[in-house]
Image (cartoon, rainbow, N blue to C red):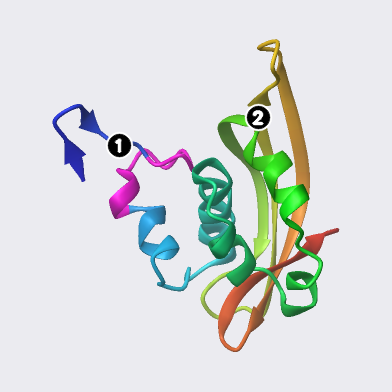
Amino acid sequence: MTSAAGPDPCPCGSGDDYQACCAVFHHGADAPTALQLMRSRYAAFVKRDAGYLARTSHPMLRAKLDSKGLRASFALAWSRLEILATRDGGADDRQGMVHFRAIWRDAAGNEQVHEERSRFVRDGGAWVYRDAGG
């Protein structure tokens, strides 16, 4: 969606407008691939959408999600997502891995990097984040 101020680019870095990209998943649609789930979860951190992060986490992780940890992540100034590699995670797969870097700035304006190999699995047919260990 474009406002009077101009387009609202999706934080995931796809180049698409947020409403046509990750907002679709944030509002209830299931991401069809592990990569799209990864991108939409990054956008959820940027948009501070704790509900989406909980919904797209493996059931074993949902109980471990704490508001203190999410508040700390939400306080960061996320600036961009870089996808480094993927393995599996397609429409017909049961598991997948996305290797990424998420860049943020600290309070002093210094660029910081969070790099991870996220593992994703299907739960009830939908992709969910399993852990950082792939």
Query: The residue under label 2 is which amino acid type?
Result: Ile
In the image, the segment drawn in magenta is 10-20
Residue displayed at 59% across by 57% down:
50
Mark 2–mark 1 CB contact (< 8 Å):
no
Residue displayed at 42% across by 64% down:
25
Q: Which residue is mark 1?
A: 8
Q: Which residue occupies the extreme right position in the image?
A: 133
* Disc number placed over residue 131 in the picture, else none: none
> Image quadrant of residue 51?
bottom right
On screen, residue 107 versus residue 21, left or right, reads right
Query: The residue under label 1 is which amino acid type?
Result: Asp
Q: Is residue 97 visible?
A: yes
Q: Earlier in the sequence, mark 2 or mark 1?
A: 1
* Disc number placed over residue 103 in the picture, else none: 2
- 30 or 100: nearer the eye? 30
> Image quadrant of residue 114?
top right
The quarter of the picture where the C terminus appears is bottom right
Specify the principal SS of the magenta part: loop
Q: CA distance from mark 2 to mark 1?
A: 20 Å
Query: Residue 100 at what x, y percent from top left?
Result: 68, 43
Q: Is residue 15 magenta?
A: yes
Crowd class of label 2 (few under 14; some 14 to 19; many from 20; radius 10 Å): some
- 2 or 97: nearer the eye? 2
Q: Is residue 56 visible?
A: no
